[in-house]
Every structure is written in C-alpha cells, then in structure tokens.
Image (cartoon, helix red, strand yellow):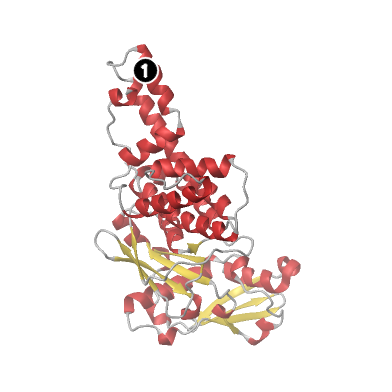
Amino acid sequence: MKIFNSIAERFFGEDFSSVVFSGFARDGDKYSANSSVGALSFFTGCDYSYLSDINKYEAIILFSYHTNQRNIVSLLNNIDRKTVGYIFPVTSLRFFDEFPDERWMKTFAVTGVEKLIHGGIGLKCFKENISGDFYKEGFNFFDLLNDNTVLLVVGKEQLSSCDISLNEILLILHRDDYFPIKKNNYLRSGRDFKNKLKLKKMSSSAVQLINILFILVNNSKHEENPVSRFITLYQIVEIYLEKVFLICVKVISSSDVLDPYSLKVSLSKCAGDRYRLALLYSNFIPNADSGVFNNCRDIINNFLSEQLEIGDCDFDWSKSLYRLRNLFVHARFKLTDTDADTVSSICDFFESCCFEIMINFDESVEIDAISLAD
C-alpha cells in the first residue's frame, strides 16, 4: 500500500527511502505492515462491513474551511438530484460511530477511506509537528491529517450517468471553497457552508480547456492581493474572448454580403477587447442580464465612480469590467484598506460570473455578419 510509504516519508524524513515494507494486512479496521525498521500499524475507526469495490470509486483529499465534524456534504446531479458522492471532513471520519444512519453515505465513506489508503496521499495533507516515535504506539489514521482537509468520494458509475468528469467536479468545487492544492499556507476566507451542492455539466468549451481553467481558478484562490486575484480571473474571460473572436472571424470570412471595406471594419471591431466583451455578455451567455452579473456590475460601477470621480456610473457588466481591468492594468494608485476590501468583494462576484461563463458559454450561437459591420 502506497500509504505506508507516505507515512514513512512523513516520520523518517530523508531516511524513508531505506524503509522497506512487506506483509501488508488489514484486520477489521486495523492496518499493519512489517518494515526494515519494525512494524507500522494504524486504525481508522470505520466499520468495514460497509466496504464496497474500491475500483468503482474515486477518493481525493481536498483542503477547505468547511471542516466541522458535522459538515458532511452531499453532491447531487443538477438534473435528477441523485447523489453522485460526498465530501467528508476528516474530523467526521474520526468519529464514524456518530455518522448519520445512512447506509449509502457510510458505504461511500468507508470505501473512500480504503481507496485512499491503497492509493497513497500527498505529504501536504499530513499535520506538522508529529513526533517521530508516534507510530510506535499505533494511531488513528485521521489523526495524521490536517484539520483543514476533507475527503471527496464519488462513484464512477454515478459520474458516468450524469456525464460529468472528476476534473469538472474538482473545478466546480472551487466555487464553494474546496481546493485540491494548498500553496504558501494561504487560503482566502471561506463562503457559507452548504450541506448539498448541485453539480452542473460544464460547457463543451470548458471541458476542452479544463486543465488551464483549473490552474487559473486555483491560482486565483491563493492570491492574497485582490488586484492580482482579479487579473488572474480576468485571464479566464480572455480565453473566452479569443473564442468569441474566432467565431466572429468564421462568420465574417464565410459571409457573401460584406464588401471589402465592411469586412475590414468588422475584423477590426472584433479584435478589440471591449467589443468582444460586449458580444460575450450579450450573445454567448444565456440569461446573463440577471443575477450575479448584475450584482458584479453594480459593485464595480460604485467602485469606478469613487476611483474615477466621474459621478454615478451606469455601465453594463461588460463595459464596467473593461473599465475596471484598464484601471488595474494602466493606472498607478495604491489601494487603501477599504478599497482592498471592496476589490475582494468584486472578485467574489466576478468569480461567480466566471463560473457562469464556463458552465453556460454557448458556441452554437448564430451571429449575423451584417451586425458585426454596423
């Protein structure tokens, strides 16, 4: 089991490579292995009568603020509301006998733990300052893990039935403050806890770009500077602005109603960020003129009014975002503490907009070539 090698690395440091394990065994909830430096054993406290086939599940350790013992989360398919998986704070797994009396939940928990033990774990998930002789006494596996960790367990069959990949889930969970990677010991303040999260299939473009989107969202979560966080999130928008441009070029190039001058004008317009932002907002995101986009627009307009001293701003979302991006990129000013708090709030709303774009971006929208030349 890879987990024993991970534990050895945690306890023995640079000498772990000389530790050789053999004879892995589990008796009830007790795991043990012989090694070149003696026996290593631990237990989990789980009831393994609930164990299912680990090959039918995925189990991953995430970081989060929502790590209260009772904060077990159900992951639901947005379409039929069926359970896809669960998120278990490690604190809840320490007290398995206090779990709700739900066989489905216990099956996911126990099988996820078994999957994790067989698959190994990253060292960042372990607590620091654990004495090297701690292993001699035998220990509860979950006492080794950081208190700000949770165990994500999803069923492969459930993922297949709702056509959502594990990478999509990991990306979507950023929205509710569950992170695969913790960097620089910083995670921004968490949002309100929800005991049920609905998983919505992302757009085909997001699926194709899942790796780069994952990196950008994850990096934005770990930015301490709110302006840096905004710029990182804006890179997500820029990815979609490029898509809008390519769609426009395709429409223009296939048009037989534009004269050479109109063709040149159209291409020039579509090359500008401001115009593409307007197209993205008005054409490619269904129902964008509502909800989080309006909330984001309002807080940006208020901030711009104060910073630019131009009276009340009444820009739509695309124009307000464009003006704010230019302000951050080109203007030289120092944020006050109040300004920093406002920009942090803007980023919270802007992040929600980015998720709406990633989920709902519609590449099938038809654009009139003549309208691009107007």
- The residue at 69%/74% (across/down) is 11
For the N terminus, the quadrant is bottom right
Choose top left, top right, bottom left or bottom right for residue 369: top left
- The residue at 69%/77% (across/down) is 129
- Which amino acid is tagged 1? Leu
| Left or right of residue 172, residue 33 in this image | right
| Left or right of residue 90, residue 290 in this image | left
Query: 374 or 288: which is nearer to us?
Result: 374
Residue 167 visible: no
Q: Residues within 10 Å of mark 1 (few under 14, many from 20)?
A: some
Task: Give the image location of residue 334, x and y in percent.
Answer: 63, 51
Query: 79 or 352: which is nearer to us?
Result: 352
Task: Give the image location of residue 296, x and y in percent.
Answer: 40, 52
Q: Which residue is mark 1?
A: 263
Choose top left, top right, bottom left or bottom right for residue 145: bottom right
For the C terminus, the quadrant is top left
Residue 192 to residue 339: above or below: below
Residue most extreme to the right: 15
| Left or right of residue 66, residue 289 in this image | left
Residue 273 visible: yes
Query: 343 or 79: which is nearer to us?
Result: 343
Task: Give the image location of residue 93, x and y in percent.
Answer: 47, 79
Total number of numbered discs in the rendering: 1
Disc 1, SS: helix
Query: 113 or 239: which is nearer to us?
Result: 239
- The residue at 36%/50% (across/down) is 293
Residue 258 to residue 362: above or below: above
Task: Give the image location of residue 213, x and y in percent.
Answer: 47, 48
Residue most extreme to the top: 260
Residue 262 to residue 216: above or below: above
